Amino acid sequence: MLLGISAVLVACNNDDSASGDGKVELDFWVFGATNYESLASEYEESNPNVTINIRKSELGDHHNSLFTAISSGTGAPDLTMIEIDQLDRFRQAQDNFLNLYDLGADEIQDQYLDWKWSMAESTDSEFLFGLPTDIGPKGLYYHTDVFNNAGLPTDPKEVSQQLSSPEAFIEAAEKVKEATGKPMVDSMEMAFRANMDAAAVSYFNRDGDLIIEESGNEVKEAYDYAVELNQQGYVGGFEMWTPEWATALNKGEFAAELAPAWLKGYMTENAPEAEGKWRVATLPEEFAGNWGGSYISIPKETKQSEEAYAFAKWLISPENQLKSFTESGLFPSAPSVYEMEEFKQNEDAYFGSQNTAEVFAEAAQDIPEVYKGPKYVTVNNEILTALQNVREGANPSEEWDAAVKRIKDLLER
Amino acid sequence: MELARDQKTSIPKKKKRSERQKDMLSGYLYIAPFFIIFAIIGLYPALFSIYLAFQKWSGFGPMEFAGLNNFAIVLQDPLFWKSLYNTLIMGVLGTAPQLIVGIVLAYFLNMAAVKFSNFFRVTIFMPYITSMVAVALVFGVFFSSNESSLANFIIGWFGMDPVNWKTSEWGAKIAISLMVFWRWVGYNTIIYLAGLQSIPKDLYEAATIDGANKIQQFFHVTIPLLKPFIVLTVFMSTVGAMQLFAEPTVFLGGQAFNRDEAMTVVMYLYRDAFNLNSFGTASATAVLLLIFIVAIAGLNTWLTSGKKAKRGRI
């Protein structure tokens, strides 16, 4: 009976997608603020036989439904975005994805940043799990009115000079708090990520051992820095991606974000009234790192691997990465874009006609290749929960110990 | 259906199904669709999750036999006990008042004197057919943690400080219990109303002649005769309360699975399966929950129906 039903479903599916008359339908799952809808329509125009169905969802939902589809072996799309933090989780199911080297990905390898490319390779470099889309080099987003009221400079270059170290960042936070009463950063997560995204090693080593308690591991330092900022009252209570957070962005309820290039997409969608109020400066070296960015993978289930690969290759080509940057702030992983005239001359209206590209391009050059591990997101969530409890008045060291204990329990499962 | 049968003895033919067998077969065919669908979407997943409870599986790759290890992990997890405690507290807060208020409301709706009683009957049933997500969103706004939210404004009249409705231990439980109460009270009222209308009028007349007042009638005629309906609603509410999931999940939003103030058992197992990709422990939790539900529902049914109603003196 079950077999009968699934056979019928498969049959229908084939009629839909597999080409009857050279027509190809590609299902493409995306998340977040991208310009992939408009790029897909462009591709459809130049390839009349191809239709691309984009399904857009939130980051968490996107990866959960992908997990379900891959796990059950049915219902996966022809192409999917996978976020960099989730990459190792899905690589556990490498057999359910296509090796993009088999489809000819080695021909375009030299067009992309090495660290970004090799993070999607297997350890023996034989298997390529995804094609690189954007990267997330971080800059210092700051609200000019708040900085101005606090007696801080508002010109990006001067800001970079003055806020050139974690200590200087705290001094600036103090000025902001005294003059305006506003917090320096929006949330504990932002404060924690300041150092966390810059760390070359995160929660696990490549053997899969949890290393947050080992000396020299920087997670605890990142945690302590966030706790310190919070004790001084420099951290706000605006959880990222909530409506309250969008309102705070809009009104400049806090001074700064240590955030990647792609945040611009969220800001233009959720904080349109703040246009012209934000600028981007270079972060102190200790805070420079990568936050986010994605890959495009092709589940093995697809009947149209060639067509899917052709579209993915086109989508991440340097010319299209330039479009994704100017339209949605997705920062290119193809260094050749950094030399393009349009990229260098890009004046961003949202940031008061500042050329933000050069700030991020500088940050993109030396990003370490970080090993995250399959359980990265799980562990990260527990640390964030501890930090949130600290912000609500809990004891920081007790919360840290409790989080480590919870993490160890979770890894047992 | 009894068909008129030919009584003549017919010439023996090839072996054919007798009429009785034919009747049986068509009967089974008529009920088959339900059982086939139930087997696919009800029974098979249920049995599979019992099988999974003894395996270690991340959703990808092969399963490993884990014996009773999943149960050991869950039973030693303080968060599991916390979620069970939350579920029981919210179950009591959400359903006990509901059943009492439901009987009282039904009693008033059943009075002949109430005008527009049909209108009220429809209105009271409305919350039950409202979309769960819409309800949770409206309650989410009402119980927003801002100091200026409606709920905080109202308790401010009584001189109370604003409550963090989504992250405080009792605030979250009370808000969610209220939501459950509001949503289900009408459903139970309608069931009681049906029960009340099945009570013969002459019992009340007899009670009146014996000199019983309205209140005595309510306790000595209405309640005892409503007993089967009370047993039914208690049973349904208990099972429903133990499986509480949608209300707290939508109400708490993005933070739902990272905090423990209002995490229910079903949320706990959902988190295991879909956030932590640990399907073995999630299934073990489901099996444990099944055992708890059977025990608690059994206890409740025994309490409400097992004892003889006491004879009060009139």
Image (cartoon, rainbow, N blue to C red):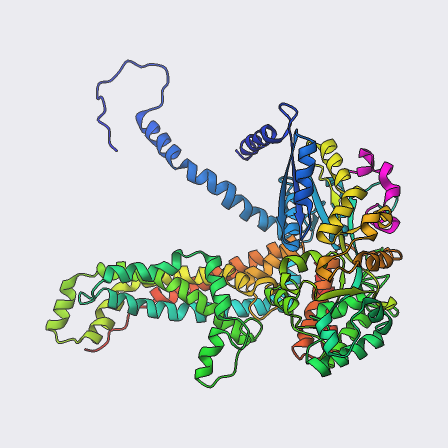
For the residue pair A142 and A123, the one nearer the viewer reads as A142
Quarter of the image where the N terminus of chain B is located: top left
Q: Is residue A104 left or right of residue B165?
A: right
For the residue pair B82 and B293, the one nearer the viewer reads as B82
**Residue A78 visible here:** no
In the displayed image of the protein, which residue is found farthest to the left? Answer: B209
Region rendered in magenta: A99-121
**Image: B43 above or below A397:** above
Q: Does the stretch in magenta take in A362?
A: no
Quarter of the image where the C terminus of chain B is located: bottom left
**Residue B174 visible here:** yes
For the residue pair A318 and A63, the one nearer the viewer reads as A318
In the displayed image of the protein, which residue is found farthest to the bottom? Answer: B159
Residue B26: x and y in percent read: 36, 30
> Quadrant of the rendered structure where residue A154 is?
bottom right
For the residue pair A149 and B203, the one nearer the viewer reads as A149
**Image: B11 above or below B58:** above
Helix, strand or loop: magenta stretch: helix
Residue B306: x and y in percent read: 35, 65
Residue drawn at point x = 36 percent, y = 20 percent: B16
Q: Does the stretch in magenta take in A104?
A: yes
**Image: A301 above or below A276:** above
Q: How many marks?
A: 0
Residue drawn at point x = 44 percent, y = 78 percent: B154
Residue drawn at point x = 70 percent, y = 62 percent: A410
Residue A169: x and y in percent read: 81, 74
Q: Is residue B55 left or right of residue B197?
A: right
**Image: B264 above or below A303:** below
Residue A211: x and y in percent read: 83, 64
